[in-house]
Image (spheres, rainbow, N blue to C red):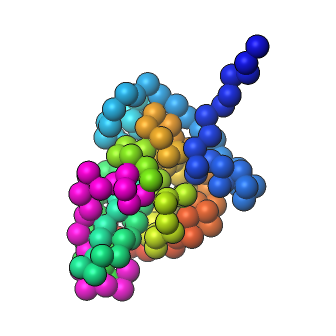
Amino acid sequence: MAKNKELKTNAMRILDRMKISYNTYSYECDEFTDAQHTADQLGFAHEIMFKTLVTVSPSGEYYVFVLPIDDELDLKKAAHEAGVKSLAMIHVKDITAITGYVRGGCTAIGMKKQYPVFVHESAQALPKMIVSAGKIGHQMELAPEDFIAASKGRFCAIVRD
């Protein structure tokens, strides 16, 4: 008789290896839904749920930004933090090729390559934050400091005022 194997994404395996504590949440979802809908479906406050956005510089370097789901990335602030002249959002069709994750299941932990990661400073004040677990229909909750450690990121101001 086969055992029911618990889903483990690349991000979860990395957290396990680092001995970082996290909780996972699953929801029914066959295709991309926005983060606000996901937060509402799971009953989470929007302030603790974060989305992952990937940008590209004119020279082709990628940068990852993690921000509260109701906020908008300020590309000028983001470029300043990344130390580049400008940034643009990557095309949705390129997400999987660049990150190894799909739209709606993208997380800064365990991408194909280690890109610079910038997390909005509001996360520092939270005891826990919720991000995608690396697969559509799955979220994970962990301490912001642990997210920074696992993603090799840093806190900064990256959202529009």
> Left of 138 or right of it: where is 61?
left
* Residue occupying the far top of the picture: 1
| Image vertical order of residue 153 relative to residue 104, above or below | below
The answer to whether residue 88 is visible is: yes
Q: Which of 52 and 1 is in front in this view?
A: 1
At horizontal 58% and vertical 60% (from top left) the residue drawn is 147
The answer to whether residue 67 is visible is: no
Q: Position of residue 144 (x, y in %)?
A: 57, 60
The quarter of the picture where the N terminus appears is top right
| Image vertical order of residue 92 relative to residue 139, above or below | below
Q: Position of residue 104 (x, y in %)?
A: 37, 43
At horizontal 43% and vertical 44% (from top left) the residue drawn is 105
Q: Where is residue 14 in the image (x, y as percent from the top left)?
A: 65, 55
| Image vertical order of residue 131 relative to residue 161, above or below | above
At horizontal 24% and vertical 79% (from top left) the residue drawn is 58
> Left of 19 or right of it: where is 73?
left
At horizontal 73% and vertical 21% (from top left) the residue drawn is 3
Q: Is 65 part of what is drawn in magenta?
A: no
Q: Nearer the viewer, residue 91 or 83?
A: 91
Q: Which of 129 and 126 is in front in this view?
A: 129
Q: Position of residue 13 (x, y in %)?
A: 66, 49
Stretch in magenta: 81-99
> Left of 111 or right of it: where is 157?
left
Q: How many marks?
A: 0
